[in-house]
Amino acid sequence: MRRRALKKEVRSIGKVKFASLKSVLALLDGLLSTQRRAHLIWKRFRGHLCVMDKRTFLKITGAAGAGLVLTPWMGCEPKDAQSGSTAMTTFGPESFKLPELGFSLDALAPSIDALTMEIHHGKHHAGYVRKLNAALDGLTLANDGSLESLLQGVSAEDASLRNNGGGHYNHTLYWEVLRPGGPDAPEGALAELILRDLGGVESFADAFAKAGATQFGSGWAWLMVNGEGKLEVSSTPNQDNPLMTQCVAQTGTPILGMDVWEHAYYLNYQNRRKDYIQAFLRLVNWSAVSERLERAISIVR
Ligand SMILES: [Fe+2]
């Protein structure tokens, strides 16, 4: 019971302002060993608060006690690699907004019907944005304020940010790569990398379709640029994505994402997920994927 209560307290830290952290930590005093507390705090805040590796953090906290070091640590802000400046972001009730679709609801019909698009964008995606804003409202984090950096730092235990931040990021990408237009197949550098890393467009399509079809329950299939600058296909459950280094096994920068939640296809396809996947592959805007590839490669460099 004591351990469960403690974990609950640590999880709740992410929902209060930093000004309150000291008092929350005071509540933790005496409940468990300093080392154990340091592990829990590290687990909750790694990626958000400060540029410090785990070994250093645990060494310091083991010697001095997490409560003692966290106060100065809270003032330790991540530095921009080039300018050396720091970034702190205070989130408000509308920090993130539902993006416009950029095309009409019936633009993808009959493959994806207008009602599915209306519900998917106007209800499901809007819901993720609303809940994400509610979770972050009033928080000040050592973060540049971008959704990408939030997701890169999200811990597996932070269900609210993981699900709603992931939901917002994933759907924004989905609408972008489904935008009508562009060539029918990958071209240029994208086609070359697909050939080099995945054996060609056909092999890629098979692997991508398989990733989507075999993802148990709700989730996503991805084409990403991994840390070595190579293309890779993966799938993730729920609203996880390859940016979430603390939550998923295959990490990288997504350049194509396919939603395989039933809400993405059920009105048209019912249980025929494979038919939806084939329709999706015919709808992909390869120009948008190429643009994302260019940005992703520049990050790796
Ligand atoms: Fe969705």
Image: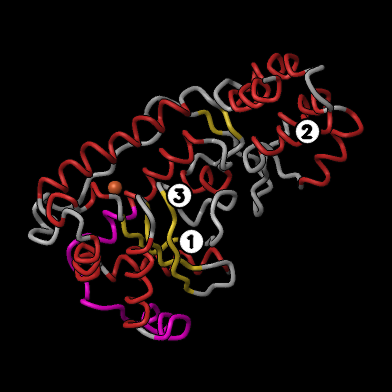
**Which three-letter amino acid code belongs to the residue tagged 2?**
Ala
Q: Is residue 242 above or below residue 205?
A: above
Q: CA distance from mark 3 to mark 2?
A: 26 Å
Q: Residue at x 71, y 33 (%)?
A: 40
Which segment is the magenta one? 173-199
Q: Earlier in the sequence, mark 1 or mark 3?
A: 3
Q: Is residue 205 above or below residue 177?
A: below
Residue nearest the observer in this picture, 72 or 125: 125
- Disc 1 marks which amino acid? Thr
The extreme right residue here reads 63
Q: At 34% across and 63% down in the image, what residue appears?
A: 212
Q: Nearer the viewer, residue 112 or 84?
A: 112
Query: Which x, y percent locates residue 16?
Result: 57, 20
Q: Tell me: 81 left or right of 193.
A: right
Q: Amino acid at mark 3?
A: Asp
- The numbered disc on residue 38 is 2
